[in-house]
Amino acid sequence: MQTVVSPKKIGILLVNLGTPEAASYGAIRRYLSEFLSDRRVIEMNPLIWQPILQGIILTVRPFRIVKPYRMIWNNQENKSPLSVITERQIQKLQSRFKNKPVLIDWAMSYGKPSIEQKISHFLKKQFYHLFLLPLYPQYSATTTASVNDKLFKILQKYRKQPAIRTMFSFADYPVYIQALYKQIETTLNSLSEQPERIILSFHGLPQTYVDRGDPYEQECQKTATALRKMMNKDERYMPLVYQSRFGPGKWLEPNITDVIKKLVTEGVRNIAVMAPGFITDCLETIEEIGHQYKALFLKEGGKKFIYIPCLNDGEIGIDMLEGLINEELRGWI
C-alpha cells in the first residue's frame, strides 16, 4: 500500500520596518521610541543613549516629521501608505497560492501588527513550517538581523517549535533585478522626454557599522551593478547614492543631496530617482524623495524630476514576490 503524505502547512510572514498607528505626535513618538531603542539599530550603550533618546530626540523629532506623515497619510483608511500597500501585497500574493497549503501574512518590526502576533496566529492554526521574508533586499544587521532576533526570541516561549526558513538577502537575485528593470522601463515608456540620469537611492547607514563588518554597502553595490548590467548602463548614468542621514556622525557616501547639487552644476536638468532598497513606498520614498529631493533639485536649477515608484502591489511587484517565495520554498512545496 502506498503511503499518503499530508502536505505541509506553510506559513509565510512578510515583514516590513514599521509605521506609526496615526499621523500624530504621540503615535510617532511611540513608534520612534520602539524603533530607536533596538540595539541593532542604535549600537550605543543604552545607559548613554536612552536619556538622549527619551529626553531630546523624542521631544523634537516627532514634531519635525508629523507634517510629512500627514502629507502622505491615507485618510480614507486612516493608515500610512506602508500599511495599506503591504496589506494589498499580501492579499494579491495569497490569491497566487490559493491552491496550495500556504497562509501568507504580514507584520511590522516596530508597531502593529507585530511579529509576535502573527507567529502566534500561525502556530494556533497548526502551521509548523514557517518562512520569514524580511522585505529588505539588501542585508543589514539593522534590518534583516533585527527581524531574525525578534523571531527567535519569540520562539523561545514555545515548547513545540516550527521548522524555520529565513531570507538572508536578494540583492542581486535575477527575479528581483528583472522586476526593477521592468519598473524602470514602464516609467520611462510613459515619459515624453527621457531622463539624463537615473539615480539609485538607498537608505543610509552609519559608516562605523560598515567598518565593524555590516555588509550593507556591498549589498547595495550588488544591486546597482546587476541593474546597470541588465539595462546596459554605466555608473555615470545610474549613480548609487544614500539618503535619510540621521545624527552628526559620518554616514555612507555619496549622499543624495550632494549628488543632486553636483549634477545640476554639470548641466543635468532632467533626472529620475528610484529607491531599490524599498519594496513598498513609505515616508522615505513618497515624501523624502518625491517632495524634499524634488524641491531641492528644482531649487538648484533642475527642470524635470521623476520618481520611479517602488514595486508595491502592482503586477511586476507581485510577480517578483511570488517568484522569490517559490524559489525559497523548494522542498516544502
Image (cartoon, rainbow, N blue to C red):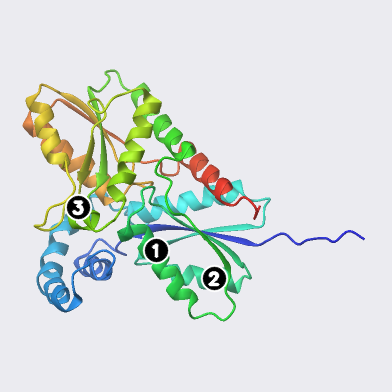
Location of residue 226 in the rendering, given as x and y in whole percent from the top left corner: 38, 33
User: For the residue carrying disc 3, how many other residues have a C-alpha within 10 Å: few (<14), some (14-19), or many (20+)?
Assistant: some
* Circle 3/circle 1 CB separation < 8 Å: no
Q: Amino acid at mark 3?
A: Pro
Q: Viewer-proximal residue, 164 or 304?
A: 164
Q: Nearer the viewer, residue 12 or 45?
A: 45
Residue located at (26% from left, 63% from top): 41
Amino acid beneath label 1: Val
Q: Quadrant of residue 61?
A: bottom left
Q: Which residue is mark 2?
A: 121
Question: Can you tell which quarter of the image residue 2 is in?
Answer: bottom right
Is residue 78 visible in this depiction of the protein?
A: no
Q: Earlier in the sequence, mark 3 or mark 1?
A: 3
Which residue position is annotated with label 3? 68
Left or right, residue 123 beside residue 39 = right
For the residues labelled 2 and 3, say whether their Cβ atoms are less than 8 Å apart: no
Q: Residues within 10 Å of mark 2 (few under 14, many from 20)?
A: some
- Relative image position of residue 55 (x, y in whole percent): 11, 74
Q: Secondary structure at mark 2?
A: helix
Q: Amino acid at mark 2?
A: His
